């Protein structure tokens, strides 16, 4: 159903595909300007990250940021949109479990962002002349797919907040920057002070982002080996969706006790 | 006969924030429903009657599981509210007031199909039911256009069709003719009547008493969250049997209205404006006997009278007699 609706807004997908290239372009160009040319910038970059390929590094970061952003806000945006158009109550009138609807919405979002990721990454690679088929692609894909499960949990947490505060845009504006900062969109989190590094590592997308970069560019895993990092993401896969769904149903129940889900 | 809907002491208290400055607010309790108790029997059209803000929609939202009551219990089709939510949802087809619950970027047919899927109806019977609805509501010409191109009346019609998609034994309609023109409203009432003939129980909320008189077997008059009258339509009218109703049209200042209300022999009176003219409805045990005092009270207080006439008792008169207010008055707690 959402696919059908989205197909009637054809411009939306094109924008989603183009944005990562623009996000990556700014630090790439700035880096080259400060570093004194591409070669000098690459040498400086290797000192901090373990790779000279800063263009691919930023391109991967910006594309994963789009996945994280698209998936995390998906439930919240969906709730708010349905609230505003008046269809949320209609959905709540049907005898379909809330979990199935939320899972459906999230799956749709995940598949869409994954497809967009592939197209956008290919486009960015073409624009910045990067080889997109380097490193261990299958392992990178595994990090991507496993990393999306905790994202579903975070999406539920965010959906619960939207249901309560009934405001999506301001929260997203704020959270976008926090998310991009914590997951190391433009830089390795190794440059953070230790306390901030701990905070960043409590955030599943940080592991997802680093896992993909490490698989494709060899920047190094947080725990030396890919299977340890993937295992940490696996733990997040259990905890985050469970906690997200628990909080969502609690807030939903509270709202039903109050003015109802249709109030906005 | 066992009721298909049982409501016992249903109470709903909202907490509403009252802004008292830029940053300060205080929480205020709003009693939307005050211990509603009623039974609705299989196969009847039951009217929930009352002005805007009376609590009709809150009651509907509680019965359809959208809101949880603060206190009390209800059973629909044998299922208990709060315990069997999904079974209750499957037992009802619902159209909420000013129903915006349609996807504007989908066609009418796609909307019906989508909501049918939410009710877990397999594709073949879903298509069959959608086709039946399209034919019943004469939606054939518009059903393959996206909803955004519909007029508000067409949207209401489709929203009504959506309420029929699960072919439920109970149909709950909250002010379904609100934005419809007269012919469309009549057409919809005919469909409701036919559906009832086929055995469906219908709960029909309206603030237009003429509509309730035309359609409903029984009804409950709700005012400020309480049931103030309950019974068959003739029973409700008969409750004013020993009283008569007089209507006065013209220009009636507030002082004249107050003077009429203060007259001995006036049970209740309510003033409303209709199409720019004012109408005073007076309920009195013996209207003829008070007619001279009535005219004096009005003329002495500056009223300009255009017409005075005794009228037949309507459901609206019953409401006026019970509350001293007309149905046009908005009683929502601000």
Image (cartoon, rainbow, N blue to C red):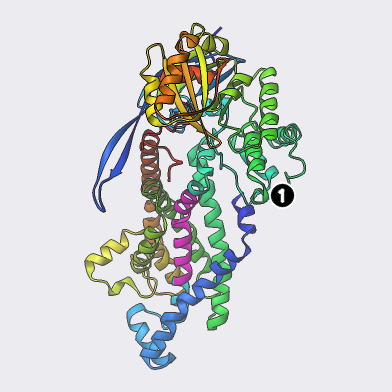
Above or below: residue B229 compared with residue B130: above
Q: Is residue B306 visible?
A: yes
Given residues B225 and B253, the one toward you in this image is: B253
Residue B182's spot in the image, x, y percent?
A: 67, 34
Above or below: residue B71 compared with residue B180: above
Residue A63 is inside the magenta segment: yes
Residue A153's spot in the image, x, y percent?
A: 41, 50
Chain part drawn in magenta: A62-81
Given residues A144 and A84, the one toward you in this image is: A84
Residue B280's spot in the image, x, y percent?
A: 48, 25
Helix, strand or loop for the magenta stretch, by majority: helix
For the point 36% across and 67% down, the residue is A177
Subunit ID for the residue under disc 1: B
Residue B284's spot in the image, x, y percent?
A: 45, 12
Given residues B65 and B205, the one toward you in this image is: B205
For the point 34% across and 69% down, the residue is A181
Residue B238 is inside the magenta segment: no
* Left or right: B107, with A26 as reference point: right
For disc 1, the marked residue is B145
* Left or right: A222, with B291 as reference point: left
């Amino acid at each position: 159903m959402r696919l059908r609706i989205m197909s009637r807004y054809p411009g939306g997908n094109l924008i989603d595909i183009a944005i990562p290239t623009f996000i990556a372009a700014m630090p790439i160009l700035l880096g080259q300007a400060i570093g004194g040319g591409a070669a000098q910038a690459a040498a400086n970059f290797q000192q901090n990250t373990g790779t000279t390929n800063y263009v691919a590094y930023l391109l991967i970061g910006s594309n994963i940021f789009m996945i994280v952003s698209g998936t995390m806000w998906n439930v919240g945006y969906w709730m708010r949109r349905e609230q505003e158009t008046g269809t949320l109550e209609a959905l709540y009138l049907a005898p379909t479990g809330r979990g199935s609807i939320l899972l459906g919405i999230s799956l749709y979002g995940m598949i869409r962002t994954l497809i967009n990721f592939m197209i956008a990454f290919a486009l960015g690679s073409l624009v910045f002349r990067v080889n997109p088929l380097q490193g261990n692609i299958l392992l990178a894909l595994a990090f991507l797919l496993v990393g999306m499960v905790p994202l579903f949990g975070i999406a539920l947490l965010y959906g619960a907040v939207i249901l309560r505060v009934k405001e999506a845009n301001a929260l997203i504006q704020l959270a976008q920057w926090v998310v991009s900062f914590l997951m190391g969109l433009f830089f390795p989190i190794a440059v953070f002070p230790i306390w901030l590094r701990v905070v960043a590592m409590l955030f599943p997308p940080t592991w997802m982002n680093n896992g993909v970069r490490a698989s494709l560019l060899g920047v190094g895993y947080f725990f030396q080996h890919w299977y340890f990092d993937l295992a940490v993401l696996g733990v997040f896969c259990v905890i985050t969706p469970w906690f997200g769904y628990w909080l969502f149903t609690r807030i939903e129940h509270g709202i039903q006790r109050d003015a109802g889900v249709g109030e906005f | 006969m066992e009721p298909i809907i049982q409501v016992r002491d249903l109470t709903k208290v909202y907490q509403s924030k009252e802004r008292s400055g830029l940053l300060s607010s205080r929480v205020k309790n709003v009693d939307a429903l005050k211990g509603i108790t009623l039974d609705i029997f299989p196969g009847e059209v039951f009217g929930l009657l009352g002005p805007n803000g009376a609590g009709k929609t809150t009651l509907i939202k509680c019965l359809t599981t959208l809101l949880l009551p603060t206190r009390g219990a209800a059973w629909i089709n044998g299922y208990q509210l709060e315990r069997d939510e999904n079974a209750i949802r499957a037992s009802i087809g619902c159209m909420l007031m000013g129903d915006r619950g349609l996807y504007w970027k989908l066609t009418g047919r796609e909307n019906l199909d989508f909501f049918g899927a939410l009710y877990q109806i397999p594709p073949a019977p879903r298509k069959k039911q959608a086709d039946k609805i399209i034919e019943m509501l004469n939606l054939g010409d518009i059903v393959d256009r996206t909803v955004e191109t519909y007029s508000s009346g067409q949207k209401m019609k489709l929203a009504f069709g959506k309420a029929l998609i699960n072919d439920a034994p109970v149909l709950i309609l909250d002010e379904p003719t609100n934005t419809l023109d007269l012919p469309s409203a009549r057409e919809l009432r005919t469909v409701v009547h036919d559906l009832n003939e086929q055995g469906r129980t219908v709960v029909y909320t309206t603030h237009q008493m003429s509509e309730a008189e035309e359609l409903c077997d029984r009804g409950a008059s709700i005012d400020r969250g309480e049931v103030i009258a309950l019974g068959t339509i003739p029973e409700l009218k008969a409750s004013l049997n020993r009283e008569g109703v007089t209507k006065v049209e013209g220009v009636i200042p507030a002082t004249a209205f107050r003077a009429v209300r203060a007259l001995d022999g006036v049970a209740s009176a309510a003033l409303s404006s209709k199409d720019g003219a004012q109408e005073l409805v007076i309920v009195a045990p013996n209207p003829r006997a008070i007619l001279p005092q009535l005219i004096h009270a009005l003329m002495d207080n500056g009223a300009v009278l255009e017409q005075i006439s005794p009228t037949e008792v309507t459901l609206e008169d019953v409401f006026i007699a019970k509350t001293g207010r007309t149905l046009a008055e908005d009683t929502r707690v601000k």
